[in-house]
């Protein structure tokens, strides 16, 4: 039998909170591990009463999901925390936001509705906005049309275990081109498959079908993340939990 | 003058490099002050990768001390990895600070902290990227004054051509003095140009300006003499010593990076200096005397630091933390304060002493019980007498066994190889010791699930130590001894599988030896290596022994010298050493006597308990040992659970 530390087990989780935060400005260069460290330290500074796992190496109960790639900005990153004492979600949001650096901004915090299913299951698609400075919008539109016309577009993707060929086309649900301040912009909704098709892979697909090669680095922002609805829109993943919000108002406790 | 941020030019490059987060700054507790509102601008550099440099306490302390001044600002800069360096050259982006991404070229001063000599090539790379002339004599008054500090600055001769000044000793006060001098010189309209500024700096206590000292050489290649070239600079430069650590509770707001770093914890320095007298230890020799921070001073730094950072572990730093006069009480009272908060407290490697196990048990009460580390340094009792780190084999085994019996599963033992007078037999005793430790540990803990890691490094003789005269062991000798040690450990697999051996081959140590005890002539070897593509010499994937040996052979041959002359050659008593004009306070005669005692295996006590043995530091520097106990205690804090 595995050894167990002496003493009582840690206090149980009494409340689960789900949070949305951003990765803006220079902090888009943070990796998901950098963000995890920053969030855990901010939770300690904000004195949020985290629940801990048992054992010799107790870890705070935090689940991260669907992190945007390093270098991509995001308006819609999600994580879930377990607390050992109940707190008002809005006060947790404000306290955590205040102890995080500018650029990592906590936008929403809701209590998980019991029986509403896991948050990870509600994150199956992303709406990206990709700015392509120096790219001609018409050329981009033609490339996108070519991509959408194909059934399969294989691209080589670098993974932990070497290069792997992935069908980028299969992940693309919708794509449209716009122009803002003279810069071509690609709006694209991508299904989160395994392995994940990222903005770089979409660009590789455009290069493959139409030889589109941006002269300058692209800038991608994840605008929304959630479940794909029937119309191909990305639904708010915290929607199913919001019903719970009103019922805990009376139990407010300061953080 | 306004100075623009390089970030807009840098940002597109960051998308193309590894770990870009290390270049964007914005760490918790980082500061950016308006350029035009201060007179003096410091860029502080740690000449290694961000992940190594960020946690450096020295740099963090000076960053805060300088930024607290109304007339100065300080920003940080680190060595840039080759992927970004290449892009920066291609796109004309200079070496930048991570705080406001200002060009290093535009600062008044570039302070570089050398914890190890293997950072020298990174200094050259940074100067070149910054657009600052490599050689100090080629700089004019628009270029930053390059100031070297840190332990390696106690022999800055190998980089004398590249730095404008070197600072000896504690930095807290001297950076203020330097700032005053630069501010006054600028306010007066920069009279006399750069040379006048450097002459004024040379008159600041603890500041050495190499260009005002001329070195001449004898026919046999040794130094004939080192003479000052101006009357208004000191003949010998003495080190600085901060006497009351409680007056300098820095860092108050430790930096917390987003990127991963080598130390994922905050540190509080509980005392400075060490008088244990380990003869190999440069840090212990050059930082004397011992000055303790008080228990209450430490308590408030731990409290403030945890609140400011959110770290879950605090390291209680010093050269030998268990020697603090209040350590037992400190451990208990800190553990009481943070009971139930998942806050871990740790000591760096400690001497082999049963008391340290008790301490470690107490400190790990609230946090994670990782491994325990002891540093016997020498494999045999004989060699431990030579290095003055005396502990009997029985005590060593008993201490480690106690650790296993107390529930520690992993014990790490630090050793050195290639020590003066060492033979194969001394090193083979490490294997016997490890086997003995595992046998006794299995018995005491009733478990086979225990491990002992033997970590061993090649010894490098350092300036200002009794071993400064010693011949360094060759890379072949080190590699041979490591090989027979490995074979001995693996001889019995039933025990050997519980023993891990971590070591580095002897080659980097030889180069470190060249740079540690080198003179000004070694500068051309460093420059040649950098020109041939050498940098990040502390990283095995970047270090090239061949590049160094080729450069050393070709640059030193015309002088009638070679690598061996600087490394494996034993020095004689009256040889002028390259650092003799730099005063650590240690009396050279005492160092020689201690070297002779080492060879005759005679030990010396610790002056904190056994009386003064006249090392020379206190009278020379006007300092004294400052230890407790204070009789004070830590009051409970209201810690939020």
Image: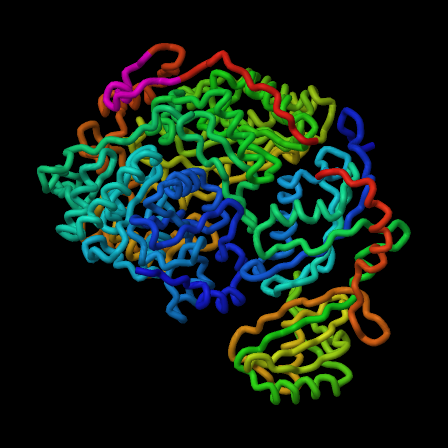
Q: Residue at x 39, y 52 (%)?
A: B545
B454 or B58, which is in the foreground?
A: B58
Q: Residue furthest front?
A: A250
Q: Residue at x 57, y 60 (%)?
A: A29
Q: Main secondary structure of the magenta part?
A: loop
Q: Position of residue A190 (x, y in %)?
A: 74, 72
- Up the image or down, B447 lies above or below B10; here it is above
In this rendering, position of residue B269 left or right of residue B92: right
Q: Position of residue A192 (x, y in %)?
A: 76, 67
**Quarter in which the N terminus of chain B is drawn:** bottom left
In this rendering, position of residue B614 left or right of residue A186: left
A168 or A134, which is in the foreground?
A: A134
Q: Quadrant of residue B601?
A: top left
- Up the image or down, A192 lies above or below B311; here it is below
Point out the stretch of residues depicted in magenta: B612-626
Q: Position of residue B382 (x, y in %)?
A: 43, 20
- Up the image or down, B464 lies above or below B550; here it is above
Q: Residue at x 12, y 42 (%)?
A: B216
Q: Position of residue B403 (x, y in %)?
A: 63, 22
Residue A198 on the magenta span:
no
B20 or B461, which is in the foreground?
A: B20
Question: How is this picture coloured?
Answer: rainbow
In this rendering, position of residue B153 left or right of residue A63: left
Q: Residue furthest right?
A: A115
Q: Is residue B12 visible?
A: yes
**Quarter in which the C terminus of chain B is drawn:** top right
């Amino acid at each position: 039998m595995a050894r167990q530390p002496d003493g009582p087990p840690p206090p149980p989780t009494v409340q689960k909170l789900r949070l949305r935060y951003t990765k803006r400005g220079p902090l888009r260069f943070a990796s998901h591990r950098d963000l995890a460290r920053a969030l855990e330290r901010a939770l300690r500074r904000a004195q949020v009463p985290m629940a801990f796992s048992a054992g010799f190496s107790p870890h705070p109960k935090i689940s991260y999901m669907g992190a945007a790639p390093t270098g991509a900005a995001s308006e819609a990153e999600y994580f879930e925390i377990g607390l050992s004492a109940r707190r008002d979600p809005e006060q947790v949001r404000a306290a955590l936001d205040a102890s995080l650096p500018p650029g990592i901004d906590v936008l929403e915090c809701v209590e998980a509705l019991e029986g509403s299913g896991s948050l990870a299951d509600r994150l199956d698609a992303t709406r990206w906005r990709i700015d392509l400075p120096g790219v001609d919008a018409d050329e981009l539109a033609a490339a996108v049309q070519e991509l959408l016309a194909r059934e399969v577009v294989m691209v080589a993707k670098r993974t932990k275990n070497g290069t792997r060929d992935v069908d980028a086309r299969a992940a693309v649900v919708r794509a449209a081109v716009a122009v803002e301040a003279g810069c071509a912009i690609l709006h694209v909704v991508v299904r989160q498959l395994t392995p994940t098709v990222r903005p770089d892979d979409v660009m590789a697909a455009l290069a493959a079908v139409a030889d589109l090669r941006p002269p300058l680095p692209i800038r991608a922002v994840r605008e929304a993340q959630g479940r794909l609805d029937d119309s191909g829109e990305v639904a708010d993943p915290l929607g199913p939990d919001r019903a719970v919000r009103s019922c805990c108002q009376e139990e407010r406790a300061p953080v | 003058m306004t100075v623009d941020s390089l970030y807009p030019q840098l940002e597109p490059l960051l998308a193309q490099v590894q770990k870009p987060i290390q270049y964007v700054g914005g760490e918790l507790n980082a500061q950016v002050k308006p350029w035009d509102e201060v007179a003096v601008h410091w860029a502080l550099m740690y000449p290694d990768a961000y992940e190594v440099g960020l946690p450096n306490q020295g740099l963090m302390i000076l960053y805060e001390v300088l930024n607290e001044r109304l007339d100065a600002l300080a920003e940080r800069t680190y060595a840039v990895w080759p992927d970004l360096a290449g892009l920066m050259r291609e796109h004309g982006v200079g070496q930048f600070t991570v705080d406001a991404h200002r060009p290093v070229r535009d600062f008044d001063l570039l302070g570089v902290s050398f914890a190890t000599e293997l950072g020298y090539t990174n200094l050259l790379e940074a100067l070149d990227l910054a657009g600052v002339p490599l050689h100090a004599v080629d700089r004019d008054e628009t270029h930053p004054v390059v100031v070297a500090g840190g332990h390696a600055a106690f022999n800055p001769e190998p980089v004398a051509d590249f730095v404008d000044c070197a600072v000896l000793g504690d930095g807290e006060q001297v950076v203020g003095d330097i700032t005053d001098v630069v501010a006054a010189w600028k306010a007066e309209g920069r009279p006399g140009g750069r040379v006048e500024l450097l002459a004024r700096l040379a008159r600041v206590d603890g500041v050495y300006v190499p260009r005002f000292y001329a070195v001449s050489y004898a026919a046999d290649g040794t130094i004939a003499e080192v003479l000052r070239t101006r009357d208004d600079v000191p003949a010998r430069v003495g080190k600085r010593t901060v006497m009351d650590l409680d007056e300098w509770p820095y860092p108050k707001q430790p930096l917390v990076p987003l990127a991963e770093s080598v130390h994922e914890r905050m540190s509080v320095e509980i005392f400075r200096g060490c008088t244990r007298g380990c003869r190999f230890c440069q840090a212990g020799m050059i930082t004397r005397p011992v000055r303790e921070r008080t228990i209450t001073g430490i308590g408030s730094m731990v409290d403030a630091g945890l609140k400011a950072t959110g770290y879950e572990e605090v390291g209680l730093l010093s050269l030998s933390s268990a020697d603090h006069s209040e350590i037992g009480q400190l451990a208990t009272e800190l553990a009481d304060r943070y009971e139930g908060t998942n806050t871990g407290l740790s000591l760096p490697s400690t001497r082999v002493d049963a008391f340290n196990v008790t301490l470690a048990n107490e400190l790990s009460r609230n946090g994670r019980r990782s491994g325990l580390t002891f540093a016997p340094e020498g494999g045999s009792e004989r060699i431990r007498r030579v290095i003055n780190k005396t502990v009997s084999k029985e005590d060593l085994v008993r201490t480690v066994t106690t650790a296993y019996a107390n529930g520690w599963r992993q014990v790490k033992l630090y050793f050195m190889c290639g020590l003066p007078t060492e033979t194969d037999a001394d090193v083979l005793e490490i294997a016997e010791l490890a086997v003995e430790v595992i046998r006794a540990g299995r018995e005491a803990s009733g478990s086979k699930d225990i491990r002992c890691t033997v970590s061993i490094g090649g010894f490098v003789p350092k300036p200002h130590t009794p071993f400064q005269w010693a011949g360094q062991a060759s890379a072949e000798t080190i590699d041979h001894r490591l090989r027979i040690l490995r074979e001995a450990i693996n001889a019995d697999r039933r025990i050997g599988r519980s023993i891990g051996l971590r070591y580095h081959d002897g080659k980097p140590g030889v180069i470190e030896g060249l740079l540690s005890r080198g003179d000004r002539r070694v500068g051309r070897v460093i420059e040649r290596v950098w020109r041939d593509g050498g940098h990040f010499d502390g990283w095995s994937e970047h270090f090239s022994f061949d590049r160094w040996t080729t450069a050393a052979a070709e640059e030193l041959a015309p002088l009638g010298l070679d690598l061996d002359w600087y490394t494996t050659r034993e020095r004689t008593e009256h040889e002028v050493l390259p650092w003799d004009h730099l005063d650590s306070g240690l009396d050279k005669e005492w160092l020689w006597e201690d070297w002779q005692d080492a060879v005759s295996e005679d030990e010396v006590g610790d002056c904190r308990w056994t009386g003064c043995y006249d090392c020379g530091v206190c009278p020379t520097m006007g300092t004294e040992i400052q230890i407790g106990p204070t009789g004070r205690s830590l009051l409970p804090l209201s810690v939020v659970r």
